[in-house]
Image (spheres, grey):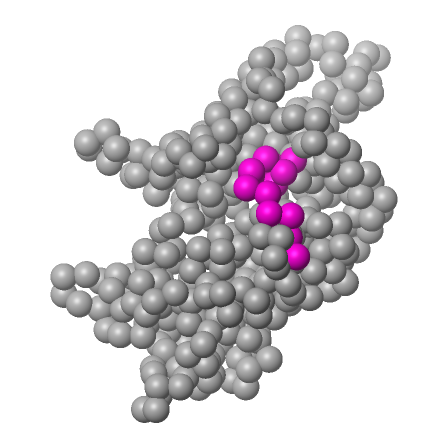
């Protein structure tokens, strides 16, 4: 039922990524999980492969590709193998749109070549211990110096994906007080070099899933940030954050559909091979019915993700449509993976089986990028509720 989403170029790229995963990721992935992140040089390897530069203009060393479908291929292939590229997603799919849309020409020349090569890894620091989804309540401050040459940054952030290995962190800070009329006013984005004095990586958070992706606490103690590192205009940070929400949620939706499809494949292969009471688990009616349900949900999730992908490539993906795609695809992935794990029996709870990793990794997709409850609120508002 899936339409012709990808062309020959996409499929050739898919083969390259699939081969790369088989040779350079799958054999060592358990080591990455144990370490909490891939080796730093792995990101340079991704740079050599051209993964980081797909949507970066050619003048900065990228391929200048406008389509998001190559990214979708990467998401599908990593899910298919039950692995990840560490913090690739945040770097290439979340940070890049901010740099492309709001960085000055000088900033792009300074950062994008290293971004493409993997020599400069990035992260974004929004969430604080006391804010959660309420970004208007951000307490981190950045005060402009008397001579106007730099900001002095103070505060703390948490749940920062890639924060431990990042070279450049986009920090959302308050450069002016909020106003009674607008709690979101006064927020700006500063690009902070992690080698700066006063920048510190705190705890590396131990998560139940996504163990090959580091998540850290960050702190800023009188960090001097040159005014040349202000991203865009002062005070417009909140509107900038909203600008990329549709693509961020599309990425999560595609990942949800892909992980659900992977779970179905893993479970189907397992029940055909596993024998219970003298016959394959696949021979039982319950198994057939459960997998039939899963196959239907996977199909529906893929169709919704594909539709959102096509809309995004045409510049027509709305915040509401992205919310619908994220909500459905991530919730469907949760249901499908849970059923597929159950079919594995006790082995489904053992991490050497990829279904266990999918189960743990996928749970957070209903939280980050906006919780399922936030998605429902957005959708309800579109209905006039």
Question: Left or right of 303: which side holds 129?
Answer: left
Q: Which residue does the image show at 46% across and 43% down from the upper left?
A: 247
Query: Residue 200: x percent and y percent?
Result: 55, 78
Q: Which of the 4 image quadrants contains residue 136?
A: bottom left
Q: Which residue does the image show at 42% across and 60% down from the upper left?
A: 102
Q: Which residue does the image show at 56% across and 30% down from the upper left?
A: 257
**Is-magenta flag for residue 67?**
yes
Query: Residue 341: x percent and y percent?
Result: 65, 30
* Up-down relation of residue 352 to residue 128 (above or below): above
Quadrant in which the C terminus is drawn: top left
Q: Which of the 4 image quadrants contains residue 109?
A: bottom right
**Is-magenta flag for residue 191?**
no
Query: Residue 60: x percent and y percent?
Result: 61, 59
Q: Is residue 301 visible?
A: no
Residue at the far bottom: name it: 147
- Of residue 282 and residue 157, the one placed in the foreground of this image is 157
Q: Which of the 4 image quadrants contains residue 172?
A: bottom left
* Up-down relation of residue 64 to residue 328 (above or below): below
Q: Which residues are magenta?
A: 61-73
Q: Which residue does the image show at 14% across and 61% down from the upper left?
A: 181
Question: Left or right of 15: which side holds 6?
Answer: left
Q: How many marks?
A: 0
Quadrant in which the N terminus is drawn: top right
- Of residue 361 and residue 348, the one placed in the foreground of this image is 361
Please identify the dominant SS of the magenta region. loop
Q: Is residue 268 visible?
A: yes
Query: Residue 348: x percent and y percent?
Result: 70, 34
Residue at the far left: name it: 181
């Amino acid at each position: 039922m899936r339409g012709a989403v990808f062309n020959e170029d996409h499929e050739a790229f898919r083969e390259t990524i699939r081969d790369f995963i088989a040779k350079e990721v799958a054999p060592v992935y358990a080591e990455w999980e144990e370490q909490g992140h891939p080796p730093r040089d792995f990101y340079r390897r991704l740079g050599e492969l051209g993964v980081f530069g797909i949507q970066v203009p050619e003048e900065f060393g990228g391929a200048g590709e406008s389509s998001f479908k190559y990214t979708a291929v990467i998401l599908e292939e990593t899910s298919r193998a039950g692995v990840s590229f560490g913090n690739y997603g945040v770097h290439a799919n979340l940070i890049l749109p901010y740099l492309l849309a709001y960085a000055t020409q000088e900033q792009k020349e300074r950062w994008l070549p290293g971004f493409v090569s993997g020599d400069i890894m990035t992260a974004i620091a929004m969430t604080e211990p006391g804010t959660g989804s309420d970004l208007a309540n951000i307490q981190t401050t950045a005060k402009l110096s008397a001579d106007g040459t730099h900001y002095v940054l103070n505060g703390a952030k948490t749940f920062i994906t890639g924060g431990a290995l990042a070279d450049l962190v986009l920090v959302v800070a308050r450069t002016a007080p909020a106003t009674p009329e607008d709690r979101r006013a006064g927020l700006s984005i500063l690009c902070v070099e992690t080698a700066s004095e006063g920048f510190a990586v705190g705890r590396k958070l131990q998560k139940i899933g996504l163990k090959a992706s580091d998540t850290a606490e960050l702190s800023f103690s009188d960090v001097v940030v040159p005014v040349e590192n202000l991203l865009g205009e002062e005070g417009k940070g909140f509107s900038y954050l909203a600008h990329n929400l549709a693509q961020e949620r599309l990425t999560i939706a595609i990942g949800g559909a892909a992980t659900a499809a992977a779970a179905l494949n893993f479970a189907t292969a397992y029940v055909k091979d596993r024998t219970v009471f003298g016959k394959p688990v696949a021979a039982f009616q319950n198994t057939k019915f459960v997998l039939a349900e899963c196959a239907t949900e996977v199909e529906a999730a893929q169709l919704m993700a594909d539709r959102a992908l096509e809309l995004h490539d045409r510049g027509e993906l709305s915040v509401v449509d992205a919310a619908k795609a994220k909500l459905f695809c991530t919730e469907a992935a949760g249901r499908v993976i849970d059923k597929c794990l159950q079919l594995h029996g006790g082995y489904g709870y053992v991490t050497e089986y990829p279904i266990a990793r999918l189960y743990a990794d996928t749970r957070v997709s209903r939280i980050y990028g906006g919780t399922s409850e936030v998605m429902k609120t957005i959708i309800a508002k579109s209905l006039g509720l």
